[in-house]
Image (cartoon, coloured by chain):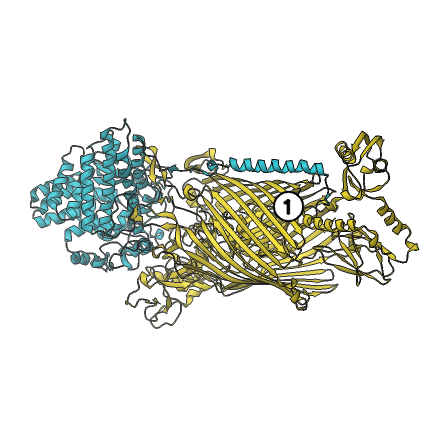
Chain colours: A yellow, B cyan
Amino acid sequence: MKLNHLLSSNWQYNLKKLTNVVKISVLLSVIMTLSSFAHTNVYSQEKISVNVENTEIINILDNIESTTDLRFFYDNDIYDFNKKITLSLNEETIAKAISLIFENNLDFRLKQNVVILEKAELLEKNNKVSTEEDDLEQRVVTGSITDNFGSPLPGATVIEVGTNNGTTSDFDGNYSIAVENDDASLQISFIGFVSQTVNIGDSNIINVQLSPDESSLDEIIVTGYGTTRKGDITSSISVLDLDGVGEKAITDVGQILQGRSAGVRVVQGSGKPGASPTVFIRGISSLSGNTQPLYVIDGVVSYTLGALDPNNIEDITVLKDASAAGIYGAAGASNGVVLVTTKKGKRGNFKVNLNTYTGFSEVINKIPLLNNTQLADYFNDLNPNITLSDQQLSTNNDWQDLIFENAQQSGVNVSVSGGGEKGSFFLGLGLLDQEGIVTTSQNKRYSLSINLDQNINEWLSFGSHFNYTRSNVKGIPDDMGAKFGGAISSALQTPSFQPIYDENGFYTVSAGGGFGLENPLSYIYSDDNLDVISNIVADANFSIKLPYNLTYKTQIGITLNNNRFTRFRDPTVSSIVSAYGGEGQLDNGERARYIFDNTLSYNETFDKHKLAVVVGNSISEENLMSSSQIKRDFASESVTTFNTAAVSLLNTSDAGSWSLESYFARANYTYDDKYSVTTSVRTDGSSRIAPANRWGTFKTFSAGWNLSNESFMDDVNFVTNLKLRAGYGETGNLPSGLNDYANILTVFDYASGDNVVSPGVIPSSQRGNPDLQWETSEQINIGLDFSILNDRVFVSADYYNKKTQNMIFPLALPVSSGFATQIVNLDGFIENKGFELNLNAYLVDEADFSWNSLFNISFNDNVVKDIPGNATIFTTFLQNLGGNLNITKNGLPIGSFWGYNSEGVDPQTGDLIFTDNNGDGAITPEDKQVIGNPMPDFTYGFVNEFSYKNWDLNIVVDGVYGNEIYNTGKQNLQAMRFFENQSADIVNRWRNPGDITEIPRATLVDENGNADINSRWVEDGSFLRIRDISLSYNFDKNVLDALSISGLRLYGNIKNWFTFTDYTGYSPEVNRALAGVDKTATTQGVDYGTFPQSKTFSVGLNIEF
Amino acid sequence: MKSFTIIKKNKKMKNILNVTAILAIMLVFLNSCSDEFLDKAPLNELSAEGFYNTQADAESAIGGIYGKMTETFSGYYKWTHSVWSDMRADNTHAGFVADFINAQLHISRASSNEPHPYAWNENFKFIGEANSVIDNVPGIEDPDFSETEKNSILGQAYFLRGFCYFHLARVFGEVPIQLSNNDSEIFKAKSSQALVYAQVEADMLMAESLLPKEHSSNFKTRARGTKGGAQSILAKVYAEIGNYTKCAEYAGKVINSGVYELLPTFEHLFDDQHKYNRESIFETVHVANNSNIATYASVQMLPPGDFSQYDDPTKKGSSWTVTYHRFNTCSTDLMAAFDEMGDEVRKYSSTLTVSDRSLISEPNYGYGPDEPVSHIYKMGRSGEIFGGSNVMHLRLADIILLRAEALNAIGQTGEAITLLNQVRARVDLAPTTATSKDEVKLAILKERRLELLVENNRYWDLQRYYNDTSAFIAYLNGLTDSSGKSLEYKATSDKIFAPIPQSEIDINPNLVQNPGY
């Protein structure tokens, strides 16, 4: 008789059903509830007292439940629970109570506080099997099945290979199977894990640890307001592989995104310590609104990653297309959504992890400039009256060397995590101390993360996350534009013969520079500034399991950003500052936002149908407050508080508030693991939109077809996991201003008497627009996933087309109308269409050598279409360099470069010959043309992870191709109009008629506009950067044992060491757009004297115990 | 039917109740999110809707315009007007290679550079602000708002609007005319210069009828639109459109109003100690150390370097050492004109000569390599970055000389000489020796040059004097440096007017660029 026949059909059924329960639980709570039943039990000693007459058993049990912590668990069919009995018990054990209540017909098992009632005969027989093993012909194999963390896996299937014989594991993960054959193999499988086949050999105890199947369709993926089984996904969602991130000395979360996912372009525009990169998902789809993705941290919509220490990140999922992101509606989901999950403790796995590293950074390249002799020659060219004295020529300062330094960097992160039977915790502490490569610049960041999870009982669980960072950033003045100084521009333009100090001991001021350019050291040392930025993202959430597979979740999140900026310009250092007795600045800003989400989710599987539904609502409100003060004339440079300053220059404050109210629903239905459809709808109302148009509704629909599960694919072996996806969705974007729809008045001082100032009121230069409404992006996405070579190579390809309509834009009005701008919804649209390809290849997977390779490439084509003719948009006003640089108009990508096309230098005049496009014989603004496109043709990333014995090597390469950069640095350094230092290239300038050269003449007046905006300053911005190489060594177990630790890893990491580019500026990654004066998306690809990036080398140690 | 529950049935009942409760809570919560939650009025700005209700509202609305005209970091009515009047003519040069100024003089494709956006953008902004007063103030129903007060505020709005259109007409010739902020047509084409002048005339006549001769305080009489201010601009308009009879009439109204008289000491006009004096018809008021409305650019008139190195202790600024300076280098022609007239008083008050050439590495437009270089001192006197110097826009001496010019033109040369001599006497100059109409005409031109240096007159004074474009152009192109070498102005007849800012051309499809650009 076979063992599994001994099990009642009923029990079998229930086990199956249990499996489903487990599956669903996994979907809901990632194995939280059922796997928490414990091995030890204090409840067996629980004392029970019952005193009833003629009472239904069900009520007796109820009574016991209400007086003790015990809970009963049983199948209704195994006994007549409505039977009335009379019973008197006083402080008896469970065993005694059970035997009396059920008259020895039922037996029980105790799991934690749950009393599982079973038919006595079943247990007997079960027991008999194990005790009378030798008497039977069948051999019985027992064991436990656990996951990779050692937690039991209940409900795992154990099948004897080649037979119909099988069983499932119980709540403790234990199984017992009577095998038919002596040399049997057991196949152990569990949803979401890689199946294992084990030959039982001589052993009767086979314990199996299953590892999660990350490529599996059963992988659980975090999506908006919930999770989804990977196999059910119908949209474009990218789960980042974060392997090796811990060894990369990464200073900012944005850097993690670099190179790892097609369609996600990360631009590290500034090398300033503390500077975050900008992230573009599938191009730029807004002219004026936010272009950055929406960040959702542990479910809290945050708009920034500032509160996170990259060391505390567990998972990042990117929702790229609208059908995935649409559930976030109008809150900026048009730019994609980045879902970040922070690290949590693992149950029963107490762990301390220490990660520490130290390293240094240095400037990647210097820009070659004129030497003193060449400078003297150039100055003389400009004005023959000028000759440099011998004394001047004896001074030779390399200002780049003077400001750049080898910068130290170190980081320490400690985390403590673990968990008990019902809960887990994670605590992370971090310190980053990073100097910048420009002397004195620095960022010190302190971070703290606390994550808690607790199951309060079977149906209620609680979680809380708290992420806090405090950064102390000391910056240097940079990114101020070409002619207005800043340390970087000044280091290039200050003549080498200029002394560091003047006769009064002040740093020198350039005599020749147009606007009183200070020397770079003056900018740096006269400007003692500190930006103290505190960021908090925190939430508390309760999850309640309800009957009918419903789960209700409520989450309250807060994001809090505080910024205190102090600056003191020292009058003893700079003569300019000395003129006004020092200047102090004190800015304070706070943004506080709360978000309150409520969702009800429903998950059910019946036969071949799977249904997951979530409905919910969300409200959030943000309040902003800032103040700024500037005072001058300090009593002494040694005290910089404002009580010691005489003159108040600025004393102002600002405030704002906005709110968002949303209702959303999503349903995902899968039939037979073959066909999936997902649809969602979200309705948003926001205070930022005029009342008449306040509400907007955003719908998505997508479908997937798992071809691999079709019977006609059964014989196809070279392709597996073949799946087609297609989706359509709408997402929204809000106007960036809080009250753009309103006609407002601004207040401005006026003299109402001699030395008496009163507030005057004038109309704002921005005209109100009561018709203002949402910006909407519609996106279609078609995707194909498959794996080949026995699941060794996974391929995912997507085509998308995103159209942004009702574009919110500050339309420039003719000044003659009395207004300057109006925020409007432009007709026409921005189209971003493209193709993305992700390859993930497990090229080698041997015991002591593995090689995993990820490659992604994305092509994006950005174009503006059908906007009104007068809405041609000019941006990036280059003061004194020729006006507006970027143009946005029909048929062009956003922010194309616009100017005269240079055909080269006229050998007769030494001036540039510009293309006379309209052939009228004169060069007029009508001759301007597109001279460059800041958008790349494609971007790519290539990550290789090697593992050989104890060694791991991880290499990240990324790059862009086909974009152009407008190099204002070059424009300054080859303007040849001012008494400033210039590029070494200008030694080849035109000097005499007949000279054939590419560099025009030096001229003070520049009638021809050689130095103005023209194609000469446009350069190819393509680059390939070996972003990151990290090599780590994992110490052997014997070493670990000797040290009583569980892990020890030593690593070295180099960043940005090799860059292949033709670009002549400091770094081909330029993007001034989102930080400086021009905040609109229409200012792309302009190099503006920004803090250069650095290359970094570091070594680190990771200890775990 | 089989059931398999982790909680017993009656527990389930409780939970159904729980669900119901939670759903109810959700519902309640959702309902509580009323429209109020999404109504967020601006916290940092005033909403225009329903603002104009009281006299105080009207006063702050007109006050705001004066405030913006004195904005620290703006330009036109602080100093860039002198680029158009004096630098574009023969008085001054950009002392260093500030491309946005020199470009104006020399380069045909200058349409994205700075001084004309100052002139265009600021004047139209002020016009929009004045329109807001004209649109809204008549509707104010405030019982405490007297008709006189209402007329005064409206009159000032007409005065300021006309004042701005006057300057636009001078600098750009043809400009669009926008007379209300409620006008739905905002992409307007240009009107002819004659129509713009007609608009100035209409606004100023309206202002003249609404405004008092004097306000309640001397401060307001000098710093606000007045009948005299409107008449002064009318006199200037009539002069520029060639109606010297009316010019003389309106200049006469100002002179005979009894409100104005020449200040005995010329230097007092600009020394910051005699603001709101009896000679002042209209001045804009700056407040020292106020970051919104302090003067800022006046120091840009000054030469580089520490003032302490200059001879005259009274001409020392504060600890001014920075290099935001030297926009207005005096031409050698101007300095020669002072010397030719023997005008020591005004030369001393209006210019500053720097002998230390090491401070000036740039070419100096007419000064030989070893010559001292003069700079405009008149507007930069306070030497403070955030100083409180007022800017004089209309004063009696200007109107006296204008009436002299008009009377001479209509044949009353004798009376013209009397007026001219009044102005000369103040600066210790002997009565003019000119007698014939032409001589007097030239004498008045020369007088105006030295009396009204950088006060927004010279270019148009020359234009009126020559009354012939090619002669005017020939004059400019004939200017030489001290060694007789041409300054190469490259002036042409089609650049009499400034270019419209390219940004405006880009935005407004109905706007046509001025010829020559």
What is the count of numbered marks? 1
The residue type indicated by label 1 comes to Gly
Q: Nearer the viewer, residue A358 or A423?
A: A423
Could you tell me if residue A975 is visible in this image?
Answer: no
Q: Residues within 10 Å of mark 1 (few under 14, many from 20)?
A: many
Could you tell me if residue A1096 is visible in this image?
Answer: yes
Asked if A254 appears above or below B417 in the picture, the reply is below
Question: Is A82 positioned to the left or the right of A234 in the image?
Answer: right
Task: Name which residue lies at 27% across and 41% down.
Answer: B131
Asked if A609 appears above or below A845 in the picture, the reply is above
Q: Residue B232 in the image: state x and y as whole percent.
A: 18, 40
Task: Name which residue lies at 51% across and 39% down.
Answer: A621
Q: Residue B372 in the image: state x and y as whole percent.
A: 29, 51
Question: Is B490 positioned to the left or the right of A632 in the image?
Answer: left
Q: Residue A204 in the image: state x and y as whole percent.
A: 86, 56
Q: Quadrant of the N terminus of chain A?
A: bottom right
Question: Is B76 positioned to the left or the right of A172 in the image?
Answer: left
Could you tell me which secondary element the residue under label 1 belongs to?
Answer: strand
Q: For mark 1, what is the residue? A: A430
Q: Residue A944 in the image: state x and y as whole percent.
A: 64, 63
Q: Nearer the viewer, residue A23 or A292?
A: A23
Q: Nearer the viewer, residue A219 or B85?
A: A219
Report the chain holding disc 1: A
Q: Quadrant of residue A888?
A: bottom left
Asked if B464 appears above or below A648 in the picture, the reply is below
Question: Is B157 positioned to the left or the right of A871 in the image?
Answer: left
